[in-house]
Amino acid sequence: MISIQNLSKDFTIGNETLTAVDNISLKVNKGEIFGIIGLSGAGKSTLIRCINRLEEPTSGKIFIDNVDITSLDKESLRLVRKEIGMIFQHFNLLSQKTVYDNIAFPLQLDGQNKSQIKERVDQLLEYVELTDKKHSYPSQLSGGQKQRVAIARAIANNPKILLSDEGTSALDPKTTKSILSLLNRIRHEFGITVVMITHQMEVVKEICDRVAIMDDGKIVETNTVESIFRDPKTKTASTFINSMTNVIEDEVINPTDFNGILIRLSYLGNNANQPIVSKIIKQFDINVNILSGNINKLQETNVGHLILELTGDDDQIGKAISQLRSDDVHVEVMQ
């Protein structure tokens, strides 16, 4: 669906060149919700704006359905953009137009007649549950209602792709959950491919199929959400996962402060609901000190994390670790 090849974007500020996107290659599959997460300044928003050429790439190629959009002229690009909807953090609604007129706007630009526009807008208002707000203005809406209007406007022309640039960052947790549920419904019912830019790991956990971690303009890790949670390969990914429990392990757990062997466990699915610690205590002659732990509920499964201190006979500790691994628990020895 979307194939990004060696994409870079530079900005010139005075005599200096800032590389916001640095030689990125990425593929997004048809019908999936793909997350791109990173801290502020990582280059996420620049990357997503390159996908529909709101920003012109400095180098590299972007293919959408095997069409290289970086080579298109303005008229051809305009036609392609009709198939790409976009929602923004601050909604970007027209403040002097009603909810109806905001949703109708892209249909008017497309040259549709009034009866076609009315039928489509009424259909979308019902879909996003805002029929009673038809004649309201953006100033009269809550943040969640504004984002529902923005989503309705973004899908008005039946796009193939929906780009979300921090689309839930300005919303409270309850409203965020409802917006994510709406986006998931849109993906399943209309087959739209969704690319989500976010700095919220909670959003990735709730809705994404795969995720790419961005840092300093580069993609440092890409995997399924389950794999990222179970076994993050980079410190950036680990930091995002740890932030969900407000614990940064390196600041709280220093292996040199403990006499035993410290291990980090990650486990999926049924294992997340099993008494794995009790099992190794009963089976092996070791002592177990639980230092931290949590379970994250993803779309399809649960992912559990534990940090344990093991003390006792080295042979028994080795056998306990082997048993955990044979039970499909990922074990990382921290010291």
Image (cartoon, grey):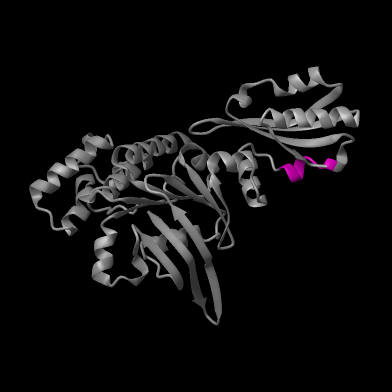
Give the percent coordinates (x, y) of residue 239: 65, 47
Instruction: Report the side of 158 relative to 197 (left or right).
Output: left
Instruction: Report the side of 308 relative to 32 (left or right).
Output: right
Residue 267 figure quarter: top right
Residue, far top: 282
The correct choice, above or below, for 270 with respect to 113 in the image is above
Residue for point 12% across, 54% down: 112
Residue for point 23% across, 40% down: 124
The correct choice, above or below, for 58 with respect to 154 in the image is below
Residue 69 figure quarter: bottom left
Residue for point 35% across, 44% down: 147
Find out whether residue 308 is within the magenta segment: no
Instruction: Report the side of 111 relative to 41 (left or right).
Output: left
Q: Nearer the viewer, residue 309 or 90?
A: 309
Give the percent coordinates (x, y) of residue 86: 34, 53
Q: Nearer the viewer, residue 84 or 54?
A: 84
Give the percent coordinates (x, y) of residue 236: 64, 51
Residue for point 18% across, 53% down: 107
Find out whether residue 253 is within the magenta segment: yes
* Magenta region, main secondary structure: helix
The correct choice, above or below, for 33 with respect to 276 in the image is below
Q: Is residue 293 visible?
A: yes
Q: Is residue 90 visible?
A: no
How many labels sit on residues? 0
Question: Which quadrant of the figure contains the C terminus?
Answer: top right
Residue, far front: 326
Magenta span: 249-255
Give the percent coordinates (x, y) of residue 204: 50, 42
Q: Nearer the viewer, residue 297 or 89?
A: 297
